[in-house]
Image (cartoon, rainbow, N blue to C red):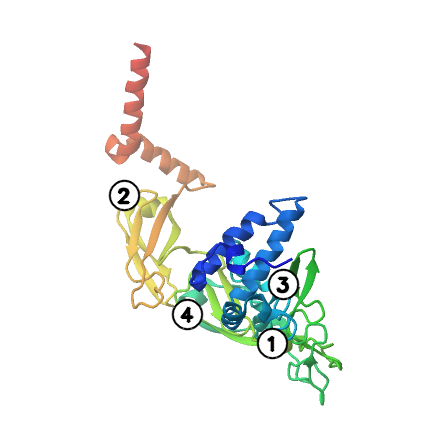
Amino acid sequence: MSKADYYELLGASKSASDKELKSAFRKMAMKHHPDRNPDDAAAEAKFKEINEAYEVLKDPQKRAAYDQYGHAAFEQGGGFGGGGFGGGAGGFSDIFEDIFGEMMGGGAGRRGDGARSGGRERGADLRYNMEVSLEDAYNGKSAEISVPTAVSCDTCSGSGAKPGSSPVTCNTCGGVGRVRASQGFFSVERTCPECQGRGEAISDRCNDCSGQGRVTKERTLSVDIPAGIEDGVRIRLGSEGEAGARGGPSGDLYIFLSIQPHEFFQRDGADLFCKIPISMATAALGGQFEVACLDSTKSRVKVPEGTQTGKQFRLRGKGMPIMRSSDIGDLYIQVVTETPQKLSKRQRELLEEFEQISSEDNSPESTGFFTRMKRFLDGLAD
């Protein structure tokens, strides 16, 4: 029985471009795919013929031979042996990746070379949590940290092979890093289980790292913390993470910073806030006090007479420095009037006397509040 014409099988003309040929193949392959035609022997046979046709016509040399000699070009003695379905290094797996791989996101084909070059995997990134004081965040500092991590094995220089030996080509995949397995009509490609995609195998492993090319050690690293650093900021130390397997590049180390709570100051961006209690006498008569600042100086705060609880005083340029800027935030002082406790007999007498001679002008806020409250209650009664 004579074989069908390859162009007719694909529904394409002899002058079809590579793009048109591929498009025609996709259309016919999808139509006769076994998954779409279960238990249909005719569709299955047609599907195989379509793939055989495209395997020949997609190759410029095979197509030229077919155009000149027809099927005879691939029969025994025709000079193109092995050109049928499943022949050659490309085979049906490559066709499947070219056509159906695009529909599933692409990028899956031709992974053998990538496995070879990517055999030295990049090491993992590491995270280190670090707490610093508000003073350190203000001034900046250089700190040393100890990080347990995987480092390149000194004995084998990261190769994983015993000194004097070297990795050899993997026998299972032939150095490609991937192997193919036939499943029905399909040839499925997967990562080589023997070398995990590296394409190399170690026959004589290093005793110190067991062939991994890296060992776990504690490293001491220096970290520069810039002035004005904020809570939650991370610092990246390039290539200071985990070493890659068998000489692969190292990952990065990320320092996650948190600012310790301070005894006196609360921070909001570049500004600082501080609550300071003052006596009732200072609030009533006025006075002054000193406050220590993070720049190691003292600032004097003057309290006018009649100062109420919650009054804020702003000290310009006494807050936090701003990273990558010459600007500095402000310090806000909030006073809280403290009610005296454990009064002596004389103190009580003086306060009672003061209460008796007080007028509405001495406590305008409380007087006004209770006046409004009385009017509200009178309105309810009406």
Q: Earlier in the sequence, mark 4 or mark 2?
A: 4
What residue is shown with label 4?
226
Most distant residue in the bottom direction: 164
> How far apart, in angstroms, are the residues tagged by discs 1 and 2?
109 Å
Q: Secondary structure at mark 1?
A: loop
Q: Nearer the viewer, residue 345 or 321?
A: 321
* Callout 3 crowding tier (Cα within 10 Å): few <14, some 14–19, many ≥20: some
Say the numbered circle drawn on residue 79.
Answer: 1
Q: Nearer the viewer, mark 1 or mark 4?
A: 1
> How far apart, in angstroms, are the residues tagged by discs 3 and 2?
99 Å
Q: Earlier in the sequence, mark 4 or mark 3?
A: 3
Q: Nearer the viewer, mark 4 or mark 3?
A: 3
Give x and y (percent) for residue 248. Answer: 59, 76
Tell me: residue 84, above or below residue 38: below
Q: Earlier in the sequence, mark 1 or mark 2?
A: 1
What residue is shown with label 2?
306
The C terminus lies in which quarter of the figure? top left
